[in-house]
Amino acid sequence: MKSLKFGVVGNPIRHSRSPEIHHHFADQQKIKISFGKYLVDEEDFENFVKDFLGLVSD
């Protein structure tokens, strides 16, 4: 099974417990995921999402 890719995006981001919470749930459900924390400023958000999704940037 292919790993599903997830993440939490923001600034600040260090305090987020989202990766731990989502990995715990995925383990319980036997789902393979990758879940990252992404430090992204507001002005860079659109380009980050395009890159994350594998879309071509303008």
Image: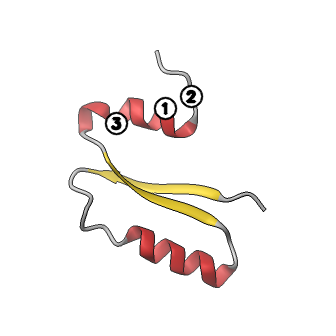
Amino acid beneath label 2 = Leu
Q: Count the marks: how many?
A: 3
Q: Which residue is mark 1?
A: 50
Numbered disc 3: secondary structure: helix
Amino acid of disc 3: Phe
Give me the disc on residue 45: 3
Residue 35 percent location from the top left of the image: 50, 61
Question: Within the image, what quadrant is residue 45 found in?
Answer: top left
Residue at 50% across / 40% down in the picture? 52
Question: What element does badge 2 sit on?
Answer: loop
Alpha carbon distance from label 2 to label 1:
5 Å
- CB atoms of marks 2 and 1 within 8 Å: yes
The label number, if any, that marks residue 55 in the structure image: 2
| Residue 24: x %, y % from top left | 52, 80
The image shows residue 46, relative to residue 15, as above or below, that is: above
39 to the left or right of 6? left
- Local crowd at mark 1 within 10 Å, few (<14), some, or many (≥20)? few
- Side of 37 relative to 43 (left or right): right
Q: Percent position (x, y) of residue 13?
A: 26, 58
